[in-house]
Image (spheres, rainbow, N blue to C red):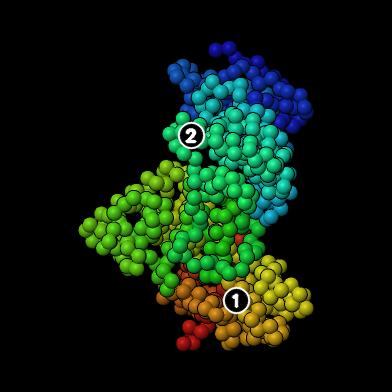
Amino acid sequence: MTRPPVRTAPTGAVYFSLLGPLTARLDGHELPLGPRKQRLVLATLLSRPNTPVPVEVLTDAVWPDDPPRTARKNLQVYVSAARTLLGPAGHEGRDRVVHGCGGYLLRIAEGELDTLRFGSLARAGRAAAGRGDLAGAARLLREALDLWEGPPLNDLRDSAGVAEEAGRLEARCLTVYEDWAETEIELGRPSVAVDGLRDLVERHPLRERLRAAWMNSLHQSGRQAEALAVYDDYRQLMARELGLEPSPAMAALYRSMLGRGREARRPAPAREAVSPAAPPACTAAFTGRPGELRELLEVLGCGEERVVVVSGPAGAGKSALALRAAHLLADRFPDGRVRVRVRREDGTARSRAEVLAELGRLCGVAGNAAAPGNAASPGHAASPEGGAGGDRAATAALADAWQEWQARHRALVVLDDVPDEASVRGLLSRSGKCSVLITARGQLAGLAPVHRIALPALADGEALELLGKLIGAGRLRADPGAALRIVRACGGLPLAVEVSGMRLAVLRHLPLAEYADRLDDPSAALDELVAGDMSVRRRIASGWQDLADGDRWVLGRLAGLAEDGGFTLDRATEALGCGERAAIRAVESLIDAGAVTSPAGEVTAHAALYEVPRLLGLYAHEREGA
């Protein structure tokens, strides 16, 4: 093997590009990247930035069929040459390419690699769209697309390993282009996207979302005949190539254009994120939680995390957040979004058989578990095992069918109000591209690996915004001090703020200051937080029932400590009358159950300030005195 030439390491900032041919530029000047095999190694490392790439993956990329006996040594030479060529990473002067037990890792910053910058801009654009800032979303998505210079890694696609990575990158680019085109259409600027969509449809004729966007852009530009022709071409292509008809959503878009009715923006997915039996999570419009919503969209939108757990106390707005995210992620999950509650209306856990049966009905999963007489039939309090004998076998068959369905589809499954880990273990996808979004009061620490998002209390501004939507901005401005007292007396709990707003919307004669006085009274606050059939006390009582007897006693003792803003471990030890180690276990058990909050950052147990949510503390006092 000829050793690649060794060049002097660059001293300026290097910028790598994969969204087109593989290139590296230093201060605007293109760097020579060496012979083809060295470029294959570099392309593979850059395709997985800041992640160890196993030696076997690099070997397959360079020698897919018959690697030589010296393959490992040759790789070391290529990596050494790349390390010398590219120089140190960042200002710390660390080696840019390092070797560890997981393989070779290439250190790269967002500003040094076009795919990282592309992903960051795309996430920011989607987040802007989620906030309703369509103009900002279009600008950010267009900025991302400007990095796309052609088929990714088009000079190295004869390597199967690189070609696979290139295909994945191109799919990401196409998805962002669809996002951008649909946003421009929403903004009333369809002509901006027409030509680019036509070119991409010619290259990807079976990509339905691209074609739907092209149809929409033509239709809303006044070119209806051309839009209808696009559909007709697609219908003939599907029949000829696959023996299939266009999807129901695509057909509905076509019919809407024929009727010249309301202009459709995009085809809707076949399944929505709401189960027919599930009550609405919230009566008010979704408010607040921008950081948590952004995190959910980024994590689920990129497809890298299969399971996300959103935790928080009863009434924290977990379901509302999950449904908002599911709505905004419609395009990431072409096979639908499905929501199933894992508790009954009385707060008790549904059996695994019941939940599987509902998932089967909603998704069209065939199985015998929903047959008459089965424990999974609606209204039956089936055992967790799904009954005896044949019922267990039927539930097992439906569980297998559910796993097969998830392996073949890309859908988002929302498992709402999960009581414990055992309720969902058999429901999570073991393979495929389905993602599961779980909401739970507790942390569900026994589930792994999952991405966790804990919902804190609403910030004052968010809580006031929610209250204002219900009572009117004018009434809020008339006495902002009293309004602030109300939301703080609610402990920033979205349900409590909403119930307060609903109550005040009916009692229009009631001054905000007087209602704030009522909520400030610990003995009366929970009595005031009732509006029609919505009761904060009832929701908190459901969470109380989830706690073990020992945890309830501990919470009752700690609730008094929390009245003045929180408690330390020393105070908890004194109140519980136990040793320090036992107090730590007791407090952490309540943290796991979602009944006690702790600092977000790392801090020692002694330095931490723990809190019991105000309304939960009031309920604990009630129970302690009962």
485 and 416: which is toward the camera = 416
Q: Residue at x 57, y 66 (%)?
A: 317
The answer to whether 81 is drawn above or below residue 471 in the figure is above
Above or below 525: residue 359? above
Q: Residue at x 72, y 39 (%)?
A: 192
Instruction: State whether residue 559 appears in this view.
Output: no
Vertical relation: 612 (above or below) 600:
below
Residue 607, percent across and down? 61, 66
Q: Residue at x 68, y 29 (%)?
A: 149
Residue type beneath disc 2? Met
What SS does tag 1 mark?
A: helix
> Where residue 432 sits: x, y (%)?
44, 42
The residue singled out by tag 1 in the image is 499
Query: Residue at (68%, 83%) from the top-left corner?
Result: 508
Residue 82 in the image, given as x and y percentages of width and height: 63, 24
Q: Residues within 10 Å of mark 2 (few under 14, many from 20)?
A: some
Residue 603 picture location, percent across and down: 60, 61
Number of marks in the image? Answer: 2
Residues at marks 1 and 2, CA–CA distance in whole angstroms: 52 Å
Name which of mark 1 and mark 2 comes first in the sequence. 2
50 on left or right of 548: right
Identify the residue under disc 2: 238
Q: Quick one: SS at disc 2?
A: helix
Instruction: Please identify the quarter of the rendering in which residue 374 is found.
Output: bottom left
